[in-house]
Amino acid sequence: MSAETIKIVITAALVLHGIAHARALVALLAQSLGNLPASWLPVRSWLFPSMSSKLVAGVASLFWLLSTLGFLAAALSFWGILIPPDVWSQVVVPAAIISTLGIVLISGIWPGAPDPRLALLDTIIALVVNFAILVAQVGLHWPPA
C-alpha cells in the first residue's frame, strides 16, 4: 500500500471515529437535557447506579466531547490541515484513552444506539479502534512521522 493510500485510510478512519463520537455526544446532550428520543437507549452508569440518567449523560458528554475534538483534530493534523502534522500522535492517544475511559467507566454502551445489540456492536467497534490506535502509536510507533 502506498504512503498516500495509508494517509487517506488513516485520516478517513479518524474522521469517521470522530463523527461517531459526535453522534454519541448529541445523544448524550439530548439525554442530559431530558430530550432523548424514545428509540435511543439511555446511558446509565454501572459505577454510580444511583446517579440520575441526566447527570450520567452530562458527565459522559465531557468524555465524548473531548474524544470527538481529539479524533477530528488528529485527522486534521495527520492530513496536515490547520494543525502541524507532527502533533497528531500527541492528540490521538489521549483521545483514544478518554474515549475508552468514557465507555468503560461511565456508559458501557454506545450512546444513542436504538437497541442493545447495536449498542454493544458500536461499543465493541469503538473499543477496537481505540485499542488499535493505542497499539499502533504507543506500542509500534506506527506510522512513522
Image (tube, helix red, strand yellow):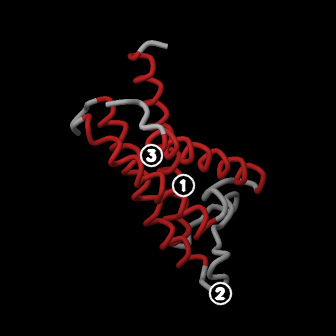
Which image quadrant for residue 106? bottom right
> Disc 2 marks which residue?
50
> Disc 3 marks which residue?
138
Q: Residue at x 71, y 47 (%)?
A: 121
Give the distance between the C-alpha atoms of the residues marked 3 and 1, in whole angstroms.
26 Å
The local crowd at label 2, few if under 14, some if 14 to 19, many if 20 or more residues have their Cα within 10 Å, is few
Reply above or below: 87 against 69.
above
The location of residue 13, given as percent across then percent down, is 49, 34
Are the residues flagged by discs 3 and 2 in contact, CB closer than 8 Å? no
The location of residue 32, given as percent across then percent down, is 52, 72
* Amino acid at dot 2: Ser
Reply above or below: 61 against 4.
below
Q: Which of marks 3 and 1 is in front?
A: 3
* Amino acid at dot 1: Ala
* Amino acid at dot 3: Val
Mark 2 or mark 3, which is nearer the start of the sequence?
2
**Residue sitting nearer the eye, 76 or 1:** 1
Q: Which of marks 3 and 2 is in front?
A: 3
Dot 1 lies on which element?
helix
**Residue sitting nearer the eye, 1 or 42:** 1
Give the distance between the C-alpha atoms of the residues marked 3 and 2, in whole angstroms.
36 Å
Dot 3 lies on which element?
helix
Q: Which disc number belongs to residue 24? A: 1
Are the residues flagged by discs 2 and 1 in contact, CB closer than 8 Å? no
Give the distance between the C-alpha atoms of the residues marked 2 and 1, in whole angstroms.
22 Å
Dot 2 lies on which element?
loop
Q: Which residue is drawn at 43% across and 54% down?
A: 67
On screen, residue 106 versus residue 120, left or right, reads left
On screen, residue 38 versus residue 34, left or right, reads right
On screen, residue 74 versus residue 12, left or right, reads left
